[in-house]
Image (tube, coloured by chain):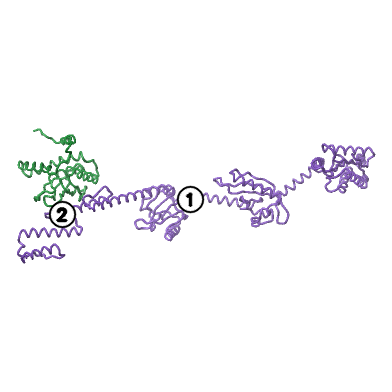
Chain colours: A green, B purple
Amino acid sequence: MAEKYEFTWELLGDIGEGRPNLGNTTRVEIYRLMQFTIRDIIEKHVGVKETDEIFYEAGQLAGNAFYQHMITKTDDLNHFVNQLKTVLKELGMGILRVEEADMVKGELILTVSEDLDCSGLPEEGYEICTYDEGFISALLENFSGKPFIVKEIDCWCTGDRTCRFSAKAVNR
Amino acid sequence: MISKDARTILEYFQSLLNDLHTSPVPPENISSDNAFIALDQTIKTIRNSAIELRNGNLSHDIRGRGYVLGSLKNLQASLRNLTWITKTIASGDFSQRVHFLGDFSEAFNSMTEKLESSIHELEEARSHFEMVFQTIPDATVITKVADGTLIAYNRAFMEATKFTDVDLTVGLFNIRDLYIDASQRESFIKALEVNGFVENLEICFYGKNNERHIGLVSSKKITIEGMPHALSVIRDITELKAIEAKLQQSEERHRLLADNAADVIWTMDLTGRFTYISPSVEKLRGYTVEEVMAQSQEEVLCPGSLIQMQEGLARAINSVQNGLPFQVYRGELEQPCKDGTTVWTEATVSGIYSEDGRFIGMLGVTRDISERKLMEEEIRRLSITDKLTQSFNRLKLDETLEQQFDWSVSYGLPFATIILDIDHFKLVNDTYGHQVGDRVLIELVEVLHDNVRNGDVVGRWGGEEFLIIMPNTTLADATVMAEWLRQAVASHAFTTAGQVTISLGVAAFATDNAPETIVSRADTALYKAKEKGRNRVEVC
């Protein structure tokens, strides 16, 4: 069956044209309202595991498009990280910090504070930033050319006050 | 008031939170309570995590949940991120900044900016030094003082020594091996260690193909990574030395020539002081070199020549001051000798200029021309002397006559002439022969010379005719003199010929327009004397 809404960057529309008065910002709770309601319904339809996979893949799709449109291609890790930090901060998506980075081994540990998805959420005892995982893995793959598996190891929702992600390159 | 159990629990947790050493055993009656176990675990995790963070261990795995542990994890994350940022900055990426850590962010970022600016300045300074180092036209090297290991070198060093980059592998090449004389390196190191620098030390060293170089080395002791090093600039003076040696040879050769030349060679500055004089001066004037060097100009030259020389010196100064070429001076100078006599010399003086055209002084060559002077004098004498009688000849008489005429015209001074002729001289020749006739002429001149005054000029006018020019003499005085001469001749016994008489005509300067007219008038008077019977004086 043909897709109804195959994602392209253009699908985001001309926000300046469409929202001349309200502009291109909205409240975080509205973003979360949409995400968690969608997640709720999908979970009901396909279960938790598959929902996580859907969110991870959606994050990857977003990460790919984000890299292509928001990041200037570079081979320098520091330059890449600096760009990413700046754009994530400017867009109010979170405060990115690198704790460890070994591109030879293909291992990174990143944290995102004040994360758009989870910061301030009630403590639930499980990590929730599956979408972020996919998003980060796509960014790293676009930068390095190698696929990455990203796993959230600490999350606000697990009472950790910051989201920590472990990223490891996959040897094909 | 609280129960004893509650107090025991409180004390247990207080100890966990506050004490260095804690009791490992929880209160017995509650140790199996799940809530207690969870709280106990959380507080222990907080305690252990805090201890690890205090110790700087950022790898400690903080397990557990909750606000405080989350905050500790956040702190740990920030510190780990700082560690990464610091490492990144240390690797040279100064674009990293810290945000959301309050005053620390600002302090850290300022430090990063300062560090970047300092590193940039250092890099600029290093780059500047590198550029200067490479563009120094002289060979420049940095070596370890301790063992001579080459640390850096510039292109000029390669050009001078012909070593290539491969030959000069930094850290392996040793400058010590280039010294021709090892003791020179010892002196160099000693001077460097004592003074901290070395200036223009002459050192001989080998190039790549064992060719010998002479370098003028200036060094400064510098410290690199705590070790003393020498920054040395080596001016290759090999060619200069060769030229210097040639010059020295040439100078020695010239000095040898000057010292041994018969001519006196000297140099003088524009103040008129000798700066060099060759020893031959002693042979010329009897004075030693030292004596001459100490003499004033007045002692070096006779008054007439001194004026000449002073004028020449003034011209030289004028030329030099106006940037004009020095005109070679050549002149005859009379110089006093140690024995009181004088010597005539010919001096040739020219300017000495440096390669860049700067006037240095004067170079003079003085030659003894005494003999030439004598010869010239003899030639002059012969040119005005009658060969037979050794009296003046017609040339001298004409000159004197003209001179006297000019003086008389100019100053109104009187002068007179006597023209005389031997009576019947043909008869003498015919009777006794020409040799006796010649003898008569010679003796006649002797008689005349014996009787004229000093200053009177006696000369052979032609054949047996003689002319006497008498300066500052009136016609009357000349007539008296003529009569005196007539008698003297008449009373003289000529060899073989016996008695010989003369006839004399006298004339004095009056209103004559030319000297010839005076002689002509005297000649007329002579003719008259002959007419009147000879052996007499007539006046016109």
Instruction: Name the residue carrying label 1.
Output: B237
| Label 1 – label 2 distance at C-alpha | 74 Å
Q: Specify whether residue A120 is in view.
A: yes
Q: Whole-percent x and y of residue B346?
A: 68, 48
- In which image quadrant can residue B397 be found? top right
Q: Whole-percent x and y of residue B219?
A: 43, 55
SS category of the residue bearing label 1 = loop
Is residue B424 placed above or below B242 in the rendered structure? above
Three-letter residue code for mark 1: Ile
Question: Residue visible at 18% across and 59% down?
Answer: B52
In this orientation, which residue lies closer to the viewer: B320 or B295? B320
Farthest residue, direction front: A21
Q: Residues within 10 Å of mark 2 (few under 14, many from 20)?
A: some
Is residue B380 placed above or below B39 in the rendered structure? above
Share a chain, discs 1 and 2? yes
Q: Whole-percent x and y of residue B488?
A: 91, 47
Instruction: Name the residue carrying label 2.
Output: B71
